[in-house]
Amino acid sequence: MLLLNLDHVAVAVRVLDEALALFSRLYGVSPSSREVIEADGVEEAMILVGGSQVQLLAPRHPDSPVARFLARHGEGLHHIAFAVPDLDAALAHLASEGAELIDREPRRGGGDNRIAFVHPRACAGVLTELVEVR
Amino acid sequence: MLLLNLDHVAVAVRVLDEALALFSRLYGVSPSSREVIEADGVEEAMILVGGSQVQLLAPRHPDSPVARFLARHGEGLHHIAFAVPDLDAALAHLASEGAELIDREPRRGGGDNRIAFVHPRACAGVLTELVEVR
C-alpha cells in the first residue's frame, strides 16, 4: 500500500468553539475549514499545521461515537488518518492481510472525500482512517 | 507561536519489532531511523509518511513512562509533536498563557533535537511535544 501523507490527527473535544479558542491562544492556529458530518454525529474543524492537519471533533448529540469516546476517555487523541491514492485497493490489501475493518466499503467523510476506518484492533490500538483525497 | 509542522504522531507499542513488522505488512512502510533514548526509557522508530512521521515508542524497562502508559491504556496513540522554530520562545509564550508544562526548559530528545513536553491538561487532553528541529 502507498501512503501519500499523514492527512490528519484527530482530537475529540467537548465544545468545538472552546477548543478552537484554546488552540488559537496557545499555538496561534485557526481552522481552515469547519463542517458538520451528520452521519457521524460530529462537527469537525481542520487546522493546517505544515504539511498535515489537526482535526478537532466535537459531538453533535450524546449518542454519537465521539460523545461515547468522551464519556469513556475524556478529551484527547481520537484517531489518525492516512491519505491513500486508491482507497479500494488499500481496503482490499488490508482485508487480504486479515486486518479488521470498520468500513468494508468506502463512504463519504469530511470534504466529501471517500474514507474508511480501520479498527484499532488491526494495528497497535490506533483507530485509523484512510482518506482518498480528491 | 509559529508551528512549522506536525512533526510526528507517537504510538505506544509493546514490542518495537512486532509493531514495525505490522506497519510494514499493512501499510508498506519502514522506519527511517531507530534510536534508544535512555533518559526516557524508550526505544523509538520513526516512519516517514509524506510530510510528517509516525513514531513508534516501546518501553525499555517496566518503570518507564511508556510502560506505565501501556499498563493503563494498552497500545495506542500516545502524543503528538509540533515542530517550532524557537523552542525557548514557544515555552515562554505557553507559560505566559498559564499552560501546564512538563518540561519548563528544553531538553534533548530523539535525533538530539531540543524538545519539551506540554501536559495533556494544558490542551484538550493531548500530550504535546514541541520539537526544535535542527
Image (spheres, coloured by chain):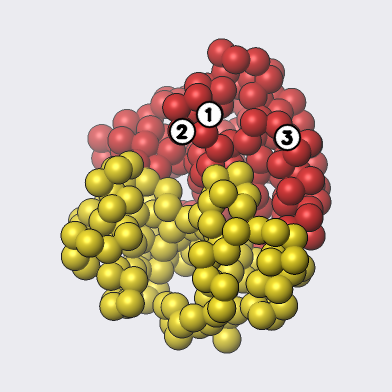
Chain colours: A red, B yellow
Task: Tell me whether the residue at label 2 lies in contact with that at label 1, contact meaning CB atoms closer than 8 angstroms.
Answer: yes
Q: Can you give x and y, in whole percent of width and height, for residue A120 in the image?
A: 37, 36
Task: Tell me whether the residue at label 3 lies in contact with that at label 1, contact meaning CB atoms closer than 8 angstroms.
Answer: no
Mark 3 Cα shell of 10 Å, populated few (<14), some (14-19), many (≥20): some
**Secondary element at image label 1:** helix
**Secondary element at image label 3:** helix
In the visual, does B4 lie left or right of A70?
right
Residue, disc 1 = A70
Q: For the point 32% across and 31% down, which residue is it?
A: A100
**Secondary element at image label 2:** helix
User: Observer-nearest residue: B43 or A40?
Assistant: B43
Q: Can you give x and y, in whole percent of width and height, for residue A37 in the image?
A: 69, 24
Numbered tag placed on residue A40 in the rendering: none
Q: For the point 19% across and 65% down, which residue is it?
A: B61
Q: Can you give x and y, in whole percent of width and height, for residue B116 in the image?
A: 54, 72
Residue, disc 2 = A73
Q: For the point 40% across and 68% down, which residue is it?
A: B46
Q: Which chain is home to disc 3?
A: A
Q: Amino acid at mark 3?
A: Leu
